[in-house]
Amino acid sequence: MTTHTQLDAWIDAHFDEQVRFLQELIRVPTDTPPGNNAPHAERTAELLQAMGIEAEKHLVPAAEVQAAGLQSITNLIVRHRYGAGGKTIALNVHGDVVPPGEGWTHDPYGGEIADGKVYGRASAVSKGDFSTFTFAMRALEAVCKPNKGSIELLFTYDEEFGGEVGPAWLLKHNLTKPDLMIAAGFSYQVITAHNGCLQLEVTVHGQMAHAAIPESGVDALQAAVQILNALYTQNTLYKAIRSKVPGINHPYLNVGLISGGTNTNVVPGTVSFKLDRRMIPEENATEVEATLRQLILDAAAKLPGITVDVKRMLLAHAMQPLPGNQPLVDAIQKHGKTIFGEDIPAMGTPLYTDVRLFAQRGIPGVIYGAGPRTVLESHAKRADERLDLQDLRRATQVIARSLCDLLS
């Protein structure tokens, strides 16, 4: 047997244990919001300790967590140093996830296995890669026994809200300084670029009035509809702006939440909505925000008695590939083709992730981990999110083989 096939065999022999580890992680909710994620970190550290793996616990101060709109965060770092020289490779995973919502046929916190898949919120994005990366590291140490370089497992809990008290907090406090990094994946592809994201909260102010005498007020909801129409018209125009990055098409805008009014028989005096503007890598985030704000203000200016407030909630820059990521891409593509029996393309994704935080500091990275052929198949952020166990096994083998090459 070659070293690579020995790694495969080790993962096969420990796969039932790996699946049980993932099931335990799914059973501790990390719904964000509200973002009470410290309990999951504590449970993860316990499970790691049972394997003989010690995790550093980095408690983010409550004031910083609350300022980010969350409740509690403890980020974890597992450091394994193998010797002088060589690269430090970080494997970054986020444990926070959107609430499950409705329509599930399996318990979203059950970790149930059916038809060769494990079901549960975050099974695919991204608690699955807590499992992928942990067992790839264990296989590496059992078989390859590297004598130089190091690995850092970063288990963080702020991706859904932008990462500022997750990986950005670790980087800011110099708790991690890797040479290369791999972040949790969600498909067969190696992701080297992704969209940026701007989120704004728009509050439209009018004047409340009794519905029997509506002319005595100024309808904020009717005004909000006019502003939304201007935004949706602009969204249609975005389709003409094309990205040159494979896997990314064009910018787009989504209004995901609207609230306002006081009662059915009252002309609404205030209405707010939250919008999400995805930016392709070629766009300038500052210009995008300025243009969008002006569009909203111009639409409001045409409406007598109406004023608007525009508040930025999130600005996540796009990720562009750094030249130093080629060793990661080459290793994953090579072993992915062997394990999956098909070419593994390197491409972009319209999602945004916390990998950008490393790229902005000059740390080359890619996104790769356990997932289906496409992210849509995983039901991520939808009911019945699931991860095919065979995909979990194969991604773990690819990561283990790649780490062995990179640390040799």
Image: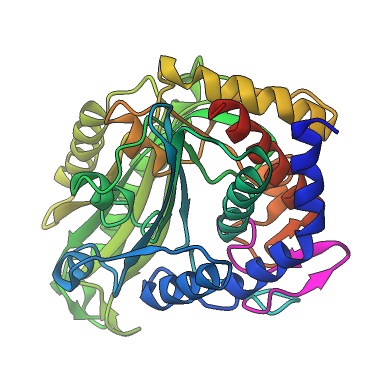
Residue 63, by quadrant, is: bottom left
**Residue at 32 percent of width and 39 percent of height:** 357
Query: Is residue 219 visible from the viewing direction of this image?
Result: no
What coloring was used for the rendering? rainbow
Predominant secondary structure, magenta span: loop
Q: Is residue 382 above or below residue 302?
A: below
Residue 298: % across, % down: 18, 38
Give the camera-side residue of 326 and 303.
326
Bounds of the magenta span?
A: 109-126
**Residue at 70 percent of width and 71 percent of height:** 20
Let me know if residue 123 is in the magenta part. Answer: yes
Q: Is residue 285 above or below residue 256?
A: above
Q: Is residue 62 above or below residue 129?
A: below
Give the camera-side residue of 311 and 360.
360
Is residue 352 left or right of 21 when viewed as pictured? left
Query: Is residue 330 visible from the viewing direction of this image?
Result: yes
Let me know if residue 172 is in the magenta part. Answer: no
**Residue at 49 percent of width and 26 percent of height:** 250
Give the camera-side residue of 391 and 71.
391
Residue 47, by quadrant, is: bottom right
**Residue at 59 percent of width and 53 percent of height:** 129
Residue 74: % across, % down: 33, 68
Q: Quadrant of the C terminus?
A: top right
Residue 266: % across, % down: 26, 81
Marker count (numbered): 0
Q: Quadrant of the N terminus?
A: top right
Give the camera-side residue of 388 and 196.
388
Residue 332: % across, % down: 64, 28
Is residue 272 left or right of 44 when viewed as pictured? left
Is residue 349 left or right of 386 when viewed as pictured? left
